[in-house]
Each structure stands twice: as C-alpha cells, then as structure tokens.
Amino acid sequence: MVTLFAPAVPVRAASVIERAQAAVDEASRHYTAGEYEEALEALRRAESLAERAEDPALPSIRFNIARCLEKLERWEQALQAYESYNELPDAAHRKRRAFRAVQALEPKVFATVSVACDPVGSVVEIEGLTQGTPSCPWRGTRVRPGSYAVRVSHPGYVAVTEFIDVEPGEPFTLQVSLERDPEAVASRALAGGAPRRFRPAPWLAAGGSLLAFSAAVGFGVTAVDQRDEAETLLASAERDDLVSAFETNRALTYVFIGLGTALAGTSAVLFVTQQSRSGRPDFGGVGTVSLSPSGLQVKF
C-alpha cells in the first residue's frame, strides 16, 4: 500500500520510521487478504509513529486509513479520515481519489433540508443548524441525521413549529404556510395602521411621464440628425423634405416634453395628496410622506 522514504535523519527518528514502515507492511498484508479491521489497526500504529517522526509518508498512511474505514462501511469515520487526509499535501492522483470518495460519502452521512414558506421572507430557526435570522426559503446541506424543531415566524402571522426527522442520504423538504395573527390585525386597526389599499394612479402617471420624456429624447435625436444632414445638402427637393421632417420631429419633441412635464406634476400631486387612513399622505398605498422640521420625509 505505501512505501516509506526515509531521508537522512537522526538515529532515533530513523528507528521510529522503521517501526512505522513495519506497521505499514503489516497493514498491506492484511488489506490484501481482505482483513480490513487488522489493516486499520496496523495503520493507526503507523500513523502515530509517522507523526512523531514527521515522516513525509503520513499523508499516504491517512489516505489508506480512510480506505480501510470505507471498506468497513464506517461511512462517517471514513469521511472524517478523508477530510483529515485532505489537510495535508500529497500526490495529485491520491487527491483526486479522495475528492471522489468525499463526494460519494457525503450523501451516506448527511442529508439536505429545504424549507419553503408562505409568506416568503419568514424567519427560519432550527436549533443546531441556523445562525442569526435566516429568511425563507432556506436550504441546508451536510445536515446530520436526527430530529429537529423548525420554527417559522413572520410579523403579523402566527408562528409555527414543525418537528422533522432527517435520514442520511434523503433530501427533506418542508412547506410551511403561516396564518395571519388576528390580534396583530386588530391592534393595527385600533392604531390606525390597517393595510393601505394600493392605488395605481400616481404610479401610472409617473410611468407615463417617463415614457413621454423617452419619446421626446427619441424625436429630439432624430430631429438633430435630420437638421445636420440637411445642412450638408444644396437646395433641392431632398433638402426640403429633410427640413420638413426636422420641423415635425422638433415639434413632437416639444409636445412630449410638455406631456412628460404635465404627467410628472400630476404624479407628484397624486403622491402627496392621496391620504391614508391615518391621515398621512402616501405613495399610492405603498409608502408614506410626512412633513418634519428637517423637510419632506418619505417612508416605504
């Protein structure tokens, strides 16, 4: 399995390396005979000796420890052994084999858990898995098998706790739908904070203003191009046509500038004058506008 190379080292270190090599040779015989438990025991001795002597063969010893554990179907221990091996530099061909082994072992050891929520953006809390306040949808990989309590919460809704059992190698998906909290809705109504109805008029006016200004830019650019081209021509029917087209596009430019300005003014008036139930101006039901000593404040 492994041939150790011992450079010039002190006699005591050389003795340790020789003992490590003897343990590796013993492990090789057991491994060839299919005696993986005995091979693992010998490799454990070799690993301890190689660590003491700082032997360069330590990576290959750990690699073969992982192989023995894999043969013994101790999946989690094998995965840990490959990860321990991957912390050390080693030959590229063994690194590739270890990478493939880790990919094959992870589904045997861990599970994938996904949580979908209604409403989206709810907070998901799973003890031992989540940190902080992750929002939904949430997905966790390398989840250890076991039972978990999943708590999902959202302002204005009744929080829900679901208990799940996770099995290795099996993806688990949990769908949670929250119900509105009657007490929260009643409190908002008493405080004048009932949900505002969305009113599209100011937004439509704002959108129309943008479209009008965009059209004005288009006609203006076309008019400038036509004027420049007409100035390069001598008096002719073609020049007269370009001048006529220029004047038309220039007029349309002014028209759309005026329309865009009017719509922008209308939009601003609608945003400010539409009143919410609380008596404060709002942005069509999706934001509020208020006056303060520092000026106009807009909140969404």
Image (cartoon, rainbow, N blue to C red):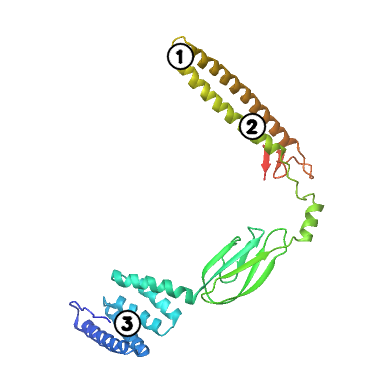
Residue under pointer 3: 47
Specify the farthest residue to the front. 237
Mark 1 and mark 2 in contact? Answer it, CB < 8 Å: no
Say which amino acid is labelled 3: Glu
The quadrant in which the C terminus is found is: top right
At a point 52% along the width and 15% down the height, the residue shown is: 241
Q: Earlier in the sequence, mark 1 or mark 2?
A: 2
Question: In the image shown, does 198 or 247 lie closer to the viewer?
Answer: 247
Q: Residues within 10 Å of mark 1 (few under 14, many from 20)?
A: few
Q: Would you say residue 293 is visible in this rendering? A: no
At a point 77% along the width and 43% down the height, the residue shown is: 276
Tag 1 secondary structure: helix
Q: Earlier in the sequence, mark 3 or mark 2?
A: 3
For this view, does 43 lie left or right of residue 146?
left
The quadrant in which the N terminus is found is: bottom left
Q: Quadrant of residue 72?
A: bottom left
Q: Earlier in the sequence, mark 1 or mark 3?
A: 3
